Amino acid sequence: MALVSLASHVHDSVLPWVLLYIGPEAFLPFTSALAAIAGAVLIFWNRLAGFARRIWQKLTGRPE
């Protein structure tokens, strides 16, 4: 009887963790999208940094 109780307790504590499992078939598209975003940022980094610099200079009142 104690073994059945122990098995039931283990089942109740493991079930939430099993439901949180994210397999590769669900995780790889997400990481692929993140890689695409990172690639686009890296391609246009120079323009993005220049744009941010111009905005910062206008906000702080510094000359270009």
Image (tube, grey):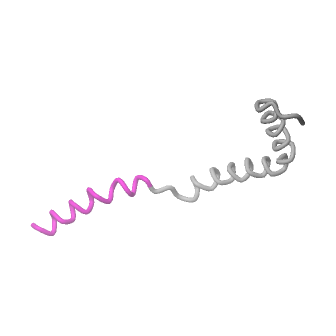
Horizontal relation, residue 4 to residue 32: left or right: left
Give the residues in magenta: 1-20
Q: In this view, does 24 lie to the left or right of 34?
A: left
Q: List x then y, in percent, for residue 35.
A: 71, 53
Residue 15 % position (x, y) = 33, 56
The structure residue drawn at horizontal position 80% and vertical position 33%, both measured from the top left corner, is: 55
The answer to which of 4 and 30 lies nearer the viewer is 30
Depth check: 4 or 52 in front?
52
Residue 25 among those drawn in magenta: no
Residue that protrudes farthest toward the front in the picture: 62
Residue ID at (46%, 56%): 21
**Residue 3 painted magenta:** yes
- The quarter of the rendered structure image containing the N terminus is bottom left
- Say left or right for 50 vs 23: right
Say which residue appears at 82% left-offset and 44% top-offset: 49
Position above or below: 3 against 50? below
Q: Which residue is drawn at 35% across and 53% down?
A: 16
Name which quarter of the figure residue 31 lies in: bottom right
